[in-house]
């Protein structure tokens, strides 16, 4: 056992008492102290039979020999390397090599970054500063595109199970998008190398699909955006992989409720900050905190535009959060290695309230127990 620092708030993984000792194997693997700290040698010995499984699981995550032509992503997708990057990982998850960028047929209408990775219109558009009121014609195109995006995400959800790679999820998203005449908006956006984002466990967002196989007990967020008829439709959901622990179930369920409660107040005249206050309050009541680095955004003919919608309250009493970026400069992870969940819809504010353009369909897979009648 190794002597830890002076963090008196760390509790013993077995009995919950204040702990100052740390499992040496966990320290070697650079795992978070929470879950690896013990108050005495006796508690450590008593917990060993179950605790040691953590080491086995992490060892299993060590990247194996990669398929031919697959490499690790660096520099926002602009570089590749055959070696696992050196990094002070915050949790058990590691990146794996990624496959080559998938091809989109010439007949598919493409956004202006598709060829060279650089958005031309979006960065300097006036719509970064002012909110666009959509025309009836734009709204109809948005409805159609958002329905396609929902169908694509549902197709991805149906293949999620232990043993499937996130690259395989990306393949499904790519092929299902093209089959419907759309372009997967994330592909080559600021050099992002894949057609969707897959964020596993401690990944907050923008995870890059790779060769890692999902494991029983994981959670995974799949974020899909489709470009069709000149507009984008964006949504994401977090799914359970096999048998998930109760804490992860609570995290995902509460996150779903946060979005649901926020949508319920949307109507003309509601201040943006009220949305964040609803989300932050519900998360805090469940013992969770909200990541402040990322927010909701406007969408339409641009992938990202005004308004930005923070998910947190201005109240400084809300929990402390931190996040970090992996060497690929896309994957955002929690600094403490704890799990993160997310849900997203594209919303149309109407005269009387809100229309969820990416709402679940009668054909959507039955994956959330709290939605069952």
Image (cartoon, rainbow, N blue to C red):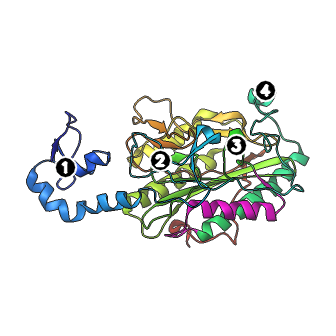
Q: Position of residue 15 (x, y in %)?
A: 16, 54
Residue 216: give its label: none
Q: Position of residue 221 (x, y in %)?
A: 55, 55
Identify residue for label 1: 12
First reached walking from the N terminus: tag 4 or tag 1: 1
Q: Which is closer to the viewer, label 3 or label 2?
A: 2
Residues at marks 4 and 3, CA–CA distance in whole angstroms: 28 Å
Q: Quadrant of the C terminus?
A: bottom right
Q: Which is closer to the viewer, label 1 or label 3?
A: 1
Q: Which is closer to the viewer, label 4 or label 3?
A: 4
Q: In the displayed structure, would residue 211 be above or below residue 290?
A: below
The residue positioned 67% from the left and 54% from the top of the image is 100
Decide: few, some or many residues near mark 3? Use Cα within 10 Å; few <14, some 14-19, many ≥20.
some
Identify residue for label 4: 124
Please name whichever residue, 367 or 208, is drawn nearer the observer in this view of the structure: 208
First reached walking from the N terminus: tag 3 or tag 2: 2
First reached walking from the N terminus: tag 1 or tag 3: 1
The residue positioned 66% from the left and 51% from the top of the image is 194
Decide: few, some or many residues near mark 4? Use Cα within 10 Å; few <14, some 14-19, many ≥20.
few
Identify residue for label 3: 267
Decide: few, some or many residues near mark 2? Use Cα within 10 Å; few <14, some 14-19, many ≥20.
some
Residue 182 horizontal side relative to residue 286, left or right: right
Please name whichever residue, 323 or 192, is drawn nearer the observer in this view of the structure: 192
Residue 170, magenta (yes or no): yes
Residue 84: give its label: 2
């Amino acid at each position: 056992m190794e002597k830890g620092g002076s963090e008196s708030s760390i509790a013993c993984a077995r009995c919950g008492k204040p702990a100052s000792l740390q499992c040496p194997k966990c320290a070697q693997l650079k795992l978070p102290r929470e879950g690896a700290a013990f108050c005495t040698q006796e508690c450590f010995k008593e917990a060993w039979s179950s605790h040691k499984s953590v080491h086995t699981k992490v060892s299993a995550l060590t990247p194996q020999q990669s398929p031919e032509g697959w490499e690790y992503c660096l520099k926002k997708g602009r570089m590749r390397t055959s070696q696992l990057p050196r990094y002070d990982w915050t949790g058990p998850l590691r990146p794996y090599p990624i496959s080559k960028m998938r091809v989109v047929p010439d007949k598919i209408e493409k956004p202006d970054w598709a060829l060279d990775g650089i958005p031309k219109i979006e960065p300097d558009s006036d719509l970064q500063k002012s909110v666009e009121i959509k025309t009836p014609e734009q709204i109809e195109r948005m409805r159609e595109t958002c329905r396609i995006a929902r169908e694509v995400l549902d197709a991805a959800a149906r293949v999620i199970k232990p043993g499937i790679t996130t690259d395989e999820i990306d393949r499904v998203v790519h092929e299902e998008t093209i089959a419907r005449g759309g372009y997967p908006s994330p592909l080559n956006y600021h050099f992002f190398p894949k057609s969707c984002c897959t964020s596993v466990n401690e990944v907050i967002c923008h995870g890059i699909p790779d060769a890692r196989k999902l494991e029983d007990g994981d959670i995974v967020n799949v974020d899909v955006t489709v470009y069709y008829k000149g507009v984008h439709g964006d949504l994401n959901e977090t799914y359970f992989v096999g048998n998930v622990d109760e804490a992860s179930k609570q995290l995902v369920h509460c996150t779903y409720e946060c979005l649901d409660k926020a949508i319920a107040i949307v109507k003309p005249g509601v201040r943006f900050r009220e949305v964040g206050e609803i989300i932050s309050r519900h998360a805090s009541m469940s013992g969770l905190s909200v990541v402040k680095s990322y927010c909701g955004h406007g969408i339409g003919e641009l992938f990202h535009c005004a308004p930005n919608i923070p998910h947190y309250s201005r109240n400084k009493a809300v929990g402390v959060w931190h996040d970090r970026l992996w060497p690929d400069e896309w994957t955002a992870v929690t600094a403490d290695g704890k799990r993160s969940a997310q849900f997203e819809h594209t919303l149309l504010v109407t005269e009387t309230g809100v229309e969820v353009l990416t709402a679940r369909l009668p054909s959507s897979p039955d994956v959330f127990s709290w939605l069952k009648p």
